Image (spheres, coloured by chain):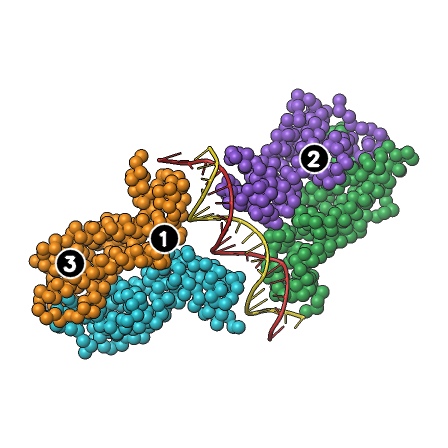
Chain colours: A orange, B cyan, C green, D purple, E red, F yellow
Amino acid sequence: MPREVRERQMLDAAVATFARHGYRAASMDGIAELAGVSKPLVYLYLNSKEDLFTACIRREAAALVRAVRHGVDPATPPDRQLWEGLGAFFTHTAEHPDGWAVLHNQARTSGEPFAREVATMRADLVAFVTELIAAAAREAHDDPELGDREVAGLAHALVGAAESLAGWADTDGSVTAKEAASTLMNFAWAGLGNLMEGERWTPR
Amino acid sequence: MPREVRERQMLDAAVATFARHGYRAASMDGIAELAGVSKPLVYLYLNSKEDLFTACIRREAAALVRAVRHGVDPATPPDRQLWEGLGAFFTHTAEHPDGWAVLHNQARTSGEPFAREVATMRADLVAFVTELIAAAAREAHDDPELGDREVAGLAHALVGAAESLAGWADTDGSVTAKEAASTLMNFAWAGLGNLMEGERWTPR
Amino acid sequence: MPREVRERQMLDAAVATFARHGYRAASMDGIAELAGVSKPLVYLYLNSKEDLFTACIRREAAALVRAVRHGVDPATPPDRQLWEGLGAFFTHTAEHPDGWAVLHNQARTSGEPFAREVATMRADLVAFVTELIAAAAREAHDDPELGDREVAGLAHALVGAAESLAGWADTDGSVTAKEAASTLMNFAWAGLGNLMEGERWTPR
Amino acid sequence: MPREVRERQMLDAAVATFARHGYRAASMDGIAELAGVSKPLVYLYLNSKEDLFTACIRREAAALVRAVRHGVDPATPPDRQLWEGLGAFFTHTAEHPDGWAVLHNQARTSGEPFAREVATMRADLVAFVTELIAAAAREAHDDPELGDREVAGLAHALVGAAESLAGWADTDGSVTAKEAASTLMNFAWAGLGNLMEGERWTPR
DNA sequence: GATGAATGAGAGTTCATTCAT
DNA sequence: TATGAATGAACTCTCATTCAT
């Protein structure tokens, strides 16, 4: 069996195990068994538990970022891009709950080498959203009402809300990715005040 | 030294340790040392690592809920209550970063007995927010535009955004509780669309 | 409460606990609790776990030897004395199962300081039986058929059989002390060969 | 080194250690050291202290029963069978004092899972002896003089005497297995009364 | 390329024992 | 006389990691 296939099996097993038990509680024995290989092979291919976890984080982070980027058409208006990006995000996290759990739940809370890894990816997404908001603001006015600092805060809040909703949608299977995206897009764009007046944001 | 004092010292040490290392990686030796007592004493007072962690979660959850409830005046309009609640929330999490880390980062990701414990508290907060949004909607219209399901999703998104911002404010010390509350309140109430037009929500 | 009473309570609790769990598995906490006193008091009165166990062994051994000696009338013929002694032995062990368990089961198997203690008492009983057999032999013949060594072996076997029956009678409540004594006396005096011919030993 | 060899080494070390110190007082560290392996290996092969002790009991019990059964020729008369069986028993216990100590001293007094294990084996031996006595009685008379209950009591006493002598012979090395078997066989078959008259049982 | 065999280091937990009061 | 408070030491068990084959 070629090395790449074996390696992917191991990473799959590792992601599933880390997602369920966390970094410390996951055992290399368990991962090797789930992957259907012997433990020394895991070490041969992936060096150490730390390296293995890092590899999981990188793979899942890259996959998530790729999914969001693929879902977005840069030629469309900012709010449309945001809408598409959120849809892609919720779709991906719903389809890869273990990967999302590794990134959002485990990596962030397992100490320094790992938290930094996932923070990098998160910064990418926040930067992306920040840019979208700024672009929308520029489009609305030549002289934007929103300061950089304010935009950053808003982007952060938006990403945080999305992350939280992703976890919720995972747990409560009845919420679809599209619903989650709609809820959040309405919330973000129209605001509660307008929502109560019956005003909605809809994809143009 | 009286039992209650010692017990609080131990819980303080445990919260600090669990916050930094997580449930599994934290060692009872380390906690005992930080508390300035011997390990058997920790076991005498708190039974087991599991019980100790549970006690930490309960204490911190109760403190957070209490802080939010105390910050809110039920006689004021819903948006005002939300604003006050968010302020109290951000203030408390900023003043007790370890407690917040235990609740938000560690307890949620350390498996079943603990996740449930914190989920209960979170459900309390979400219910509180849900009720505020519903009250605001009732106030605006006799026949509310927002369905129950939609309100629940919004409450979830709002709480998630707040939780995420709390983590951010913790990390980046330059963001004050009031700033965080303002950002989120604007975001939530006015929506990005209006914010760009220069419309702001302000405490009445 | 006078010291002697307290001390007897503690020894009672200790005997019960050691009988059930053995020396190592018994905990001073458990003994103190069962005795209804605090742990330091146990140490004040009885010094250490080792001393406590030794005290238990000595008390129970003395009681057993005293019971056997009281049951025997040295003016009667040897076989009669043996019969009475066995009866007293089985009666006492049935009435003090915990004491018997401490002596026979636990003390013998808990290492050197204790095994010697109980071996001393056992040697007493074996010497008593040895003397009875030798006396009977002398009575039967001036020039005894049985050598010293042989007599010692027989005494040992007889005591062993008695000890084993005592445990059996304890477990199976339906066997009375008198029955046990009869069985053993027949066995010892008449032998299986004669028993099959219908010959029995009976108290003269 | 192949697994089976290692496993036997460990069991040997465990039997020696348990025999000397008892279940509770024996330490896994000590056993591993005596076996010349590391502690984790003991756990890898034998799971837990409890399982290890159980494995010791089973191995030694099986060996003892096998030795007795091999020593007996079922085609010979009952008293001859008894004689051969006792000889095999004393020979085996003398050659495996640690195994015998584990069975007779430690397992019986270390609480429920273990006592039952050894009680099963003992019941086997008692049943064997019971059957021999009953057979002898049938051979002597069509209408046996001894009731079932009486036979059971006698078998119990005989086995108890044998067990006790085995311990004695172990301690006092000067007593050979054959001597012990002779003493007991004479005692059992002829009875003390007849022994004093110079009547002996001898193998036919 | 793949593994059976093995371990150093450290975790949670318990217990006999002792002060200060 | 009696105890609440406290601990040093030891025990069972686990796990990431390596090497000879």
Residue D105, percent across and down?
A: 65, 43
Q: Single out the residue that lies furthest toward the right.
A: C142
Q: Amino acid at mark 3?
A: Leu
Q: Mark 3 to mark 1: distance in Å?
A: 31 Å
The residue sitting at 74% across, 47% down in the picture is C119
Q: Is residue B36 left or right of residue D144?
A: left
Residue D53, percent across and down?
A: 57, 42
Q: Mark 2 to mark 3: distance in Å?
A: 86 Å
Residue depth check, mark 2 versus mark 3: number of the one nearer the observer: 3
Q: Residues within 10 Å of mark 3 (few under 14, many from 20)?
A: many
Labels 2 and 3 in the same subunit: no
Label for residue A22? 1
Residue B94, percent across and down?
A: 32, 70
Contact between labelled residues 3 and 2, with CB atoms less than 8 Å apart: no
Which image quarter holds the C terminus of chain B? bottom left
Snapshot quadrant of residue B52: bottom left
Q: Is residue A182 above or below residue B194?
A: above
Identify the residue position indicated by label 2 in the image. D94
Q: Secondary structure at mark 1?
A: helix
Identify the residue position indicated by label 3 in the image. A82
Residue depth check, mark 1 versus mark 2: number of the one nearer the observer: 1
Tag 3 subunit? A
Tag 1 subunit? A
Snapshot quadrant of residue D88: top right
Residue D184, percent across and down?
A: 75, 33
Q: Is residue C193 visible?
A: yes
Snapshot quadrant of residue A37: top left
The answer to which of marks 3 and 1 sits earlier in the sequence is 1
Tag 2 subunit? D
Label for residue C80? none
Front residue (pair C78, B71): B71
Q: Residues within 10 Å of mark 1 (few under 14, many from 20)?
A: many
